[in-house]
Amino acid sequence: MTSVLLIDDDSELTKLLEEYLEEEQFQLDAVHDGVSGLEKALNNQYAVVVLDVMLPGMSGLDVLKQLRQKSSVPVLMLTARGSELDRILGLELGADDYLAKPFNPRELLARLRAILRRTATSNTPSSAAGQPVHLADVELHPESRSVTAGGKPVTLTGAEFDLLHTFLRNPGKIISREDLTQAALGRPMSPMDRSIDVHVSNLRRKLGTYDGNHERIKAIRGSGYVYLLPGEQS
Amino acid sequence: MTIRTLFLKIFIWFWMAAAGIIGVLVLMVWISDAQTLPERVSRGPLSEVLNIFAESTAHTYEQEGIQGLDQYIRKSTKDTGTEVYVYDAEGKPITAPGPDNVPEVVKEVETQQQPQQRISRMFMGRTTWGKLVTGPSGNRYIVAVRFHAPGMRPSFFTTSRIIAMILTAGLVCYLLALYLTSPLKKLKSAVQSLAQGNMDARVSPQLGNRKDELGDLGREFDQMAERISMLITSQKRLLADISHELRSPLARLSVALELARKNSPPPATPALNRIEQEAERLNELVGQLLALTRLESGAERVPAETVVLEELLQQVVDDANFEAKPLHKEVKVGELEKCRVTGSPELLRSAIENVIRNAVRYTAPGTSVEIALQWKLDTAELTVRDHGPGVPESELAHIFEPFYRVSESRDRASGGAGLGLSIAERTVKLHGGCINARNVEGGLLVTTRIPLAPNSNGDQPQATFSPASLASG
């Protein structure tokens, strides 16, 4: 049984989800407000935290902000559909993925499994994945899941870390958004899905630019993204 | 601008009215003086003096002859501009004959019924006074005295005084116009500020304690603004409530549905699928409705981010193609020029997405939707052309209205709630652009124009990156 923390104020929904997910081998722990949710997430070991943005009292985004200061537990955000801003903000604050609410529970299951699959692979380092990667001024250590850029440590979320890892293993190559989604989020890309773009732009922002004005990651129209080597800047 | 002209209108009309009144007053005084002056002269104390003078003139003539008379007249009228003419009883001049209306006055005196009566007549600003007098010898003479119109009144309205009065009236009218229009100006700026979404715009503090109708108007405006801001606040709360309250049951419904699916026999599957489909449709509708209301209420603030339109468009097209392929449709991109606009990438994406999805929905299977993005002066012009049935000309203007459907035949089957284009239109408007649709041969052409970002020159930061290294990569 995988333990999942669900922070959602709709107790009827959490009850239904408990029942549904139990059959899928998930142990669901439900909390109905932000403050106790944050407390529980910090004090217990959960494989995934599912966090609703709209919470009474402390908002989901605030919970996420505070959670991220101390923990890198994977977070799946539940956002109101049509509220693009919450989604972007959530991903920027370090959520690993989002799901528009109301959602299809099958989709929730798929996202949860994707996150778990990703964390599972990165937690059991294979010989290739476990090697530290060093490219120009960026160093990435898969074992400690730490990154430094220009000698300074950079704090990345799980998704951003996996994204950077993928980029660093293929510098100068165009990687499609589909492949990046698969690598960073552990699931296939769905149409109208912008998560990967937000993750890329977060990564860009956190790493900064080469020499202050050259972008590290370039978007290639219609294809995907490419991680540039310093020499490729002209 | 209207205030300005209203100010000018009040100022000019009031001033003209004041000047007109002054003119009429001057004219009336002048006319009444002209009418009453001879009367006053022939009756008043001046007439008594003239009477004595006329008799002494006749006396002098009889005593000292024509030369003595001349001397007497010259002496007594020295430098006063007054002229004296003496006639005999038959109206024959003894001195030099008088000019202008003097002969007429003499004639009148000569032929009058009651002798000894004084006659005075105005002529060209001068008064001619005449009377029949009897000399010591018993001979009768007619003495006519012509002098400048006496009395102070006409000289009161001198030209300089009239000008001063009109200028004073002008100053008063200017102040009046200012007094009347300045609160309107303040009201106007408050209304504009409110219209631009500043819910705290109030006019009372600026108007002070004005007790008149304009003060009332200001207070009424403030009450109205208060009400509107309350309504908008409650509408926003209502939106949040709807999104929460409608969605919670929908969320539970879909989980319950999945639970039901697991525990029900296969024959129930089609019905369950249908329930799922309808729940999804309801969900979509609520989402779109919320997006639309949010756009319309002005609650959505457009961030001033730079949006790389061609990149955004390409992503939308990729997604649309993904959806179009199974339907044997295609989205083709023609010209794609670099366009930077300012606004929210998310809102613009959903606007463009709605337009393109709409085109994909209506284009016939086996055909393609053609898209182009071009620079047009200071706007980015996005054209989306489908090969579908088009829209009847009379209904073209309505397709951006919420829930508008061109015909029943192309509704449910084609999906969507008829809100996509409305959302697109509101979003584009919010970004200072416009959107319109027209029929072209065998299809519909939707043109979206969005103003380019002010410093947009088509360059992008990564433009220095050489395409050659890309090809090798």
Image: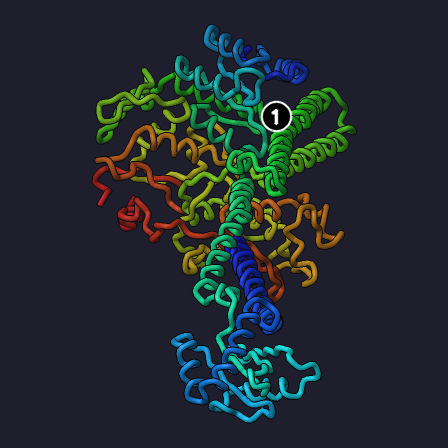
> Which residue type carries mark 1?
Arg
Q: Chain of mark 1?
A: A
Residue at point 54%, 74% (across, down): B52
Q: Residues within 10 Å of mark 1 (few under 14, many from 20)?
A: some
Q: Is residue A227 visible?
A: yes
The spot of residue A56 in percent (x, y) is 58, 17
The spot of residue A216 in percent (x, y) is 29, 36
Residue B312: quarter of image: top left
Residue at point 64%, 78% (across, down): B117
Q: Is residue B383 visible?
A: no
Is B138 situated left or right of A86 in this image?
A: right
- Between A123 and B390, the one lying in front of the other is B390
The spot of residue A159 in percent (x, y) is 41, 25
Q: Label 1, secondary structure: give it.
A: helix
- Between A149 and A185, the one lying in front of the other is A149
Residue B379: quarter of image: bottom left
Query: What residue is disc 1 on?
Result: A106
Colouring rule applied to residues: rainbow
